Amino acid sequence: MDEQLADHVAVGALTASLLPKVRTVADAIKAAFEGGHVLYTFGNGGSAADAQHLTGELIGHYKRDRRPLPAVTLSTDSTTMTCIANDFDYADIFARQVTALTHPGDVVVAFTTSGRSANVIAALAAARETGATTIVFGGGDGGRALEYADFALLSPSTATPRIQEVHTLLLHIISEYLDAWAAGEEPAA
């Protein structure tokens, strides 16, 4: 247990170097919302949970009473996902949804610990084709997902638990920023 906590603290300390990129990502999402666009999230397993977490903070609220922000998590539609997996391929589950739903100016956010999942990479490639802005919450070297990322927030770790812990921290920082903006407050630096 001590080792797990020590690893968490060490990775947390390294995460401070990501804050300028986090601000850039938050600004890009804010600009999309200002332009009337939608944010789409997805991931596999624990990353799907992170995707849902971000969407929940944006549609609900983080701390303030304010208008809901337009966000959708693609992995929550089990009927569509299993239809695509059955009729086409599991690697297509997010790409077909991205192709069907996104428009230029929308934001597509992929959560992936490895950056190597075929369904995540295909969806990011599809998002590029539709003109959406692509953001990857990843870890380690980011894997092939980085080929299609306009912005990347890479946890400074290769251990899945540490990567996901940083993803939660970063999505909370972004949620705070967007929550303040949507409530008419100046987001904190």
Image (spheres, helix red, strand yellow):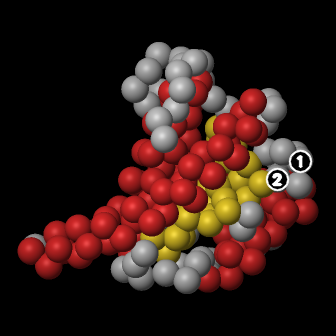
- Helix, strand or loop at label 1? It is loop
Give x and y (percent) for residue 110.
62, 61
Q: Is residue 65 above or below residue 22?
A: above
75 with respect to 148 (left or right)? left
Please indicate, yes or no, whether residue 31 appears anywhere in the rendered image.
yes
| Type of amino acid under label 2 | Ala
**Where does the N terminus fall, quadrant-wise?**
bottom left
Q: Residue at x 42, y 82 (%)?
A: 158
The crowding category of the residue bearing disc 2, from other C-alpha atoms within 10 Å (few below 14, some 14 to 19, many at least 20), is: many
Q: Residue at x 55, y 41 (%)?
A: 55
Please indicate, yes or no, whether residue 46 appears anywhere in the rendered image.
no
Q: Residue at x 45, y 45 (%)?
A: 173
45 with respect to 11 (left or right)? right
Labelled disc at residue 167: none
Residue beneath label 1, please? 104
Considering depth in this image, is 46 or 23 the residue closer to the camera?
Answer: 23
Considering depth in this image, is 24 or 152 the residue closer to the camera?
Answer: 24
| Of callouts 2 and 1, the N-terminal one | 1
Find out whether the residues at labels 2 and 1 contact each other: C-beta distance under 8 Å: yes
Q: Is residue 125 above or below residue 38?
A: below
Residue beneath label 2, please? 132
Give x and y (percent) for residue 12.
31, 65
| Type of amino acid under label 1 | Pro
Give x and y (percent) for residue 57.
49, 36
69 with respect to 149 (left or right)? left
Give x and y (percent) for residue 161.
33, 71
The crowding category of the residue bearing disc 1, from other C-alpha atoms within 10 Å (few below 14, some 14 to 19, many at least 20), is: some
